[in-house]
Image (tube, coloured by chain):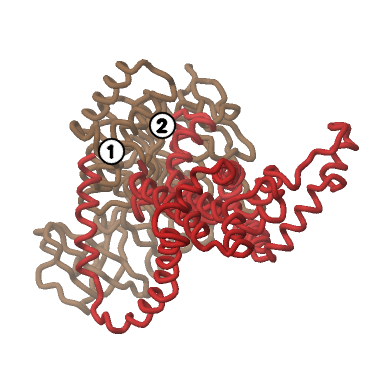
Amino acid sequence: MSVMTSTTSFAPELRQRRRPSGFAYIAPALLLIALFFIVPIASLLLRSVLEPTPGLSNYAELFGSWTYVRIFANTFLVSALVTLLSVIIGFPVAWLLAIIPNRWGSVLFAIILLSMWTNLLARTYAWMVLLQRTGVINKTLINLGLIDQPLVMVNNLTGVTIGMTYIMLPFIILPLRGVIKDIEPGILQAAALCGATKWQCLWGVLIPLALPGIASGALMVFVMSLGYFVTPALLGGTANMMVAEMIAQFVQSLVNWGMGGAAALVLLVVTLLLYAIQLRLFGVGRIGQEGQ
Amino acid sequence: MTVPFLQIRGIRKEYGAVTAVDDVTLNVEKGEFLTFLGPSGSGKSTTLYILAGFENPTSGDILLEGKTLLQTPSHKRNIGMVFQRYTLFPHLSVGENIAFPLRVRRLPKAEIDEKVRRMLKLVRLEGYEDRMPAKMSGGQQQRVALARALAYDPPVLLMDEPLSALDKKLREEIQYEIRRIHQETSVTILYVTHDQEEALRLSDRIAVFSRGVIDQTGTGPELYANPATRFVAQFIGDSDFLKGVVAATSGGLADIHLGDETVVTGVPVHGKATAGGNAAVMLRPERINLSRTAGTDRAGIAATVNDITFLGNNTHVATVTSANEALSVRLPFGDTAINGLTTGEKVWITWDPATTHAFCD
């Protein structure tokens, strides 16, 4: 793997050489970012260790209470499930989008984009209607004789997982489609002639080549899911709160900025950790080059 | 008679109203190097893809050692293929690429390692096992692709313009390698190219494709000396065509009027030749003579010198006939006819009718 180290050690040099002059021109933009991104985050984090009294009391309370830990556990469980389902459902769709003729591809693409552009609340309420006790899904299943009692799919984590998977799908399909489209079709034909069955082509060639796309899409979905508010608030019950709802309660109802900031920091640290892991495994912009 | 090794029987392939391959029939001997030569869109690649199983023919059959291949999916055909574009698995090293077909066949590891080593030796890339494809040149990648395609000892190796992405120098080097590998392995090779020089250099036999049909199949010298159609005559080697009118035909030979005064007698004729019909007479630049004075012993035509280019071992003289048709003459170095020749000069061009061909529509 000496090959890989040589690329990584070479790349920063190149980037350095290309750094543009005229720093003054981008100063306003940097100032804007500092003012509206860095300052609020820093102040929120500061409040988490300063309010109500300086120290780590907020964190101690957060990790010491079974209720809060359970909320974190719920959040990670739901986010992981949503990510897994998005990958499982999104991969074949992305594959289809990458290979079908352009005309059909653009129709399918438009449907996915349209769902993404439709108001989030409208889509979430639609799921409420579909999933409720007397909703279409339960009625159909009962009429088919598959179940006797309606399934409870709202006001719990099942509903949240279903609703969020639906919302997250475009975020994994779109990047994956790009990665799969870049795979030379001859590579799969070559694999077939080499004697690989469809299954061996999928696991031995297609998935390894798409892995950087899967990883970046999955990371995006997971991180977005961790902090998602609307869908858990509407489809989840009060008994199954997620972290974003908890932060909202701390800040809005309890006016406890310290606890809110602490919870936010925990999410941020987890996100950065995951990002670091991905960088380590796949690097920046090495998609399709060396894979693993 | 024994069954031919590979039989392509009346293959047709239609895409809607377009016929890409139109009734292609061909027998291939075991160990033969056969090239499909033709311009793009002539059906040569489609035929190859049908052999690989990526396309199904509209009708016709393919038999390998007497058994049809059409019911067998690509991955069970056991056929090797090297593609035009680079198709090495980018996430696998060179060694892993070559091992891939052996691994999917679940061969024991020791056997795979041994085979990978032998294949790397065959394509002269010993020591490159751990290299990633992205770190190799195009020529090296195609050699690895060749090693991968031969690793499972396929009875037939298909090659679809494997050298078209390489520059000329490298191309010639790898052509030599391919020849050597063909001799060492005696694998049957079906090779697709649009480059006549490549076809002549590599092949035992060449099948010339034009608009979905095979115009002619034969060795390079056969095609060059006796082209069956005008297309073959044009595609293989340099040639010029003079418009003429058939005067009389007998037994595959024709007498043809060229202009008003010249009649060429005893020209081998192809196509439907009828007296009074049009014919195109093919002349090879190196098989015609140029002289200052009209002779009577051979067929000839008057022309005007347009341009003289010295090319080392030969001199190329571009002339124009009185009917305003271009006619090239290639004179070997040392030919005295060239001495003192100037542009604008009237010359007399002669040839042996038996070495030319006439094509009728």
Q: Chain under label 1? A: B
Q: How crowded is mark 2: few (under 14 residues within 10 Å), some or many (20 or more)?
A: many
Residue plotted at (81% across, 53% down): A129
Which quadrant would residue B231 be assigned to in this image?
Answer: bottom left
Q: For the residue labelled by badge 1, is the local secondary structure a helix, a strand or a loop?
A: helix
The x, y position of residue A88, in whole percent, is: 58, 41
Q: How crowded is mark 1: few (under 14 residues within 10 Å), some or many (20 or more)?
A: many
Q: Which amino acid does label 1 sit on?
A: Arg
**Horizontally, is A291 left or right of A148 in the view?**
left
Chain B appears what colour? brown
Mark with earlier residue (2, 1): 2
Q: Chain under label 2? A: B
Could you say which chain is coloured red in the image? Answer: A
**Horizontally, is A80 left or right of B127 in the view?**
right
The x, y position of residue B218, in whole percent, is: 39, 38
Q: For the residue labelled by badge 2, is the local secondary structure a helix, a strand or a loop?
A: strand
Instruction: Identify which residue, B342 or B218, lies in the foreground.
Output: B218
Which quadrant would residue B139 be assigned to in this image?
Answer: top left
Residue plotted at (72% across, 59% down): A123
Name the residue that disc number 2 marks. Answer: B80
Residue B225 visible, this orientation: no
